[in-house]
Amino acid sequence: MDKSPKASHWNDSKESWGKYPKTEAVVCSLKSRSQKISDAIPLGQEELSYLAYGQGRSYGDSCLNDHNLLILTEKLNHFIELNPETGVIKVEAGLTLKEVLDHVVPRGWFLPVVPGTQFVTIGGAIANDIHGKNHHVAGTFGCHIKSLELVRSDGTQRICSPHQNEDWFRATIGGLGLTGIITWAEIQLKKIACPWISRETLRFHHLDQFFEYTLDSDSKFEYTVGWLDCLSQGAQLGRGVFFRGNHLLLKEASEIKSKKEKIKTFPFNAPEFLLNRFSMKAFNSLYYHTHPSKKAELVHYRPFFFPLDGINHWNRLYGKRGFFQYQCVVPFEGTQSPIYRMIETFAKSGLGSFLTVIKTFGKVSSPGILSFPRPGVTLTLDVPNEGKKTLRVLESLDEMVMDAGGRVYPAKDARMSKESFKKYFPERVEFEKFKDPHFSSSFWRRVT
Amino acid sequence: MKMLIFGATSAIAEAVARKVAYDHGDLFLVGRNSETLDLMAQDLSVRGAGRVGKANGDLTHLEKFTEWVESAAHFMKGIDVILIAHGSLGEQKELEKNSDLAFDIFNVNFISAALLAETSARYLEKGGRGVIAVIGSVAGDRGRQSNYYYGSAKAGLECFLQGLRNRLFPLGVRVLTIKPGFVSTPMTAHLKQNFLFAKPEVVATGILKAIRNHKDVVYLPWFWRWIMCVIQSIPEILFKRLKL
């Protein structure tokens, strides 16, 4: 029956960034990249399933392993090598993107792909095959991995690359940590002249205009993304703000003095009564109107890529019940895009979102078997957890995504059904051959 | 900065070394685990350190002390700071029952650290400059039933450092006693972490600042000075009844 140890054995309650679901686990730590997994597992806990845990920045439960074991990778935080000629960096997988960026930017390099936060680990970025504002030209993070080491529960260590153990490489990129533990990786960095981004901000009054902007910009700008007012309807359906940018090419620009970063902390979980349709509508409207209709400026890479990193614990905004992040991609079909219907449905649903992001994915395909991005349009909603009502609305979005032949992003998911996962990811059958039999996650048990 | 670190693989020492590397300083690492030392040396070089040397060995082997200091001085062409960072908490209940284990705890936390400080002093006083920074503990401020082996070793160490500081002052060598409170490190991994726990990086910043500012004694983070002030002021007649 239940093999799990008594409740007193759970030595840690872990949350992901979405603060939902709440879980308990036995937590242990890999002491170095050469330590065998079996030596890290506390005595008597071998029967539990394992999962590597980095910074817990996934939104849903793909980084959690309820009533099982989490193996922290925080001690794998060493740089191994940086080749100043080729820009190939070899690092341990527990380092965060921030630590890597802080180190390489002054030396004229940048990570090839960054997500919306720099507080994720390298291992997490690979396991979720993250993408960024440059997906239309650069593809996913996994496209830039030269090689990585995969350690399995049976004690084997494999160096995987596009040329060596290729099938293991493809399974591990976007493999949600289920193929074993990534201990180190070699990443091809991109050359930059300075830490500055030349950014243009354009307001769009309708979703149609977003598509015009993005179509026009994707060839000229490396980074493009749109923020949507998800609560406006009718003639203003999907109005928002479009951001596009390129790395500044001037060397002299490194001399520009940047303002000292001020990190604020969200002090406590916001009370739930503050999160209502009125406050969200006010916020969305304010955000839209406070942005100029057109503006060009120089900004530091941090506020450009990681605006929310300026507020520690910003997830407390959604109260102690947490929130869902819903990210889907649907094939690009112009005005026929189901995105229109989804936004309309959401705007009418009575739910709200502070942060709705829209972006086009390009054709660069990832080596990852379970990698999420596909050519098309991706829509991301932050939705406060209001229980059943929220789940129902997200279910209805799921149906639209399925009809359109799209998929939902596992790294951000805490609620998709088995059936949905099966339809979204027919590749899972091929993937399962490479899953480590001792590894599992709350997400994996939910969707299989 | 040219820094020699004893117990270099400890979490606090590693955090200090990374900050020195960031400023392109030279480092010489002494520690027990040669694999971890290699990993660290590689990491520190990538992070920007100038020269990174290492020696591995047991820090209770007194006969090696002079050799380590001399090879570090030779390797870095001088030494500015010697950080003595090793320590072992021990399991109080076990120590009460097993004198051999207790002897080791005194040996590591007091005898080894004190004699390393003296060996360091012999080298630095020749040049008439430099800093000896030693990691003590707030646990040395008052004996408590929960860890008086570790605590008394650290208390002895602090007294030793006071004397050494006094002796070295006219010779131009400074002695810094570092007294961290709870720090989230492997040493304290088994304890329930709460708001009093500081990150090794925070403590490391404090150590380097104290070195720059010519401090004699520093509590890290700062609030421990006041916590320990309260704990020290409780009369023994009351204190002996407390469960601390």
Image (cartoon, coloured by chain):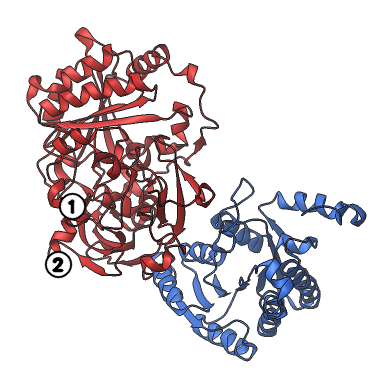
Chain colours: A red, B blue
Q: Is residue B126 left or right of residue B55?
A: right
Residue A432 numbered tag: 1
Q: Is residue B74 visible?
A: yes
Residue at (69% x, 51% y) in the render? B222
Q: Chain of mark 2?
A: A
Q: Which tag is nearer the camera, tag 2 or tag 1? A: 1
Under circle 2, the secondary element is loop
Q: Is residue A294 visible?
A: no
Q: Quadrant of residue A222?
A: top left
Calculate the distance from the C-alpha at mark 2 to the C-alpha at mark 1.
20 Å
Residue B177 numbered tag: none
Residue at (39% x, 25% y) in the render? A385
Q: Chain of mark 1?
A: A
Q: Residues within 10 Å of mark 1 (few under 14, many from 20)?
A: some
Under circle 1, the secondary element is helix
**Residue A254 percent location from the top left of the image:** 35, 49
Q: Residue furthest right?
A: B237
Along the line of sight, the residue nearer the viewer: A438 or A355:
A438
Along the line of sight, the residue nearer the viewer: B53 or A325:
A325
Vertical position of residue A447 compared to residue A96: above or below: above
Residue at (40% x, 70% y) in the render? B45
N-term-proximal mark, 2 vs 1? 2
Q: Quadrant of residue A384?
A: top left
Residue A164 numbered tag: 2
Amino acid of disc 1? Glu
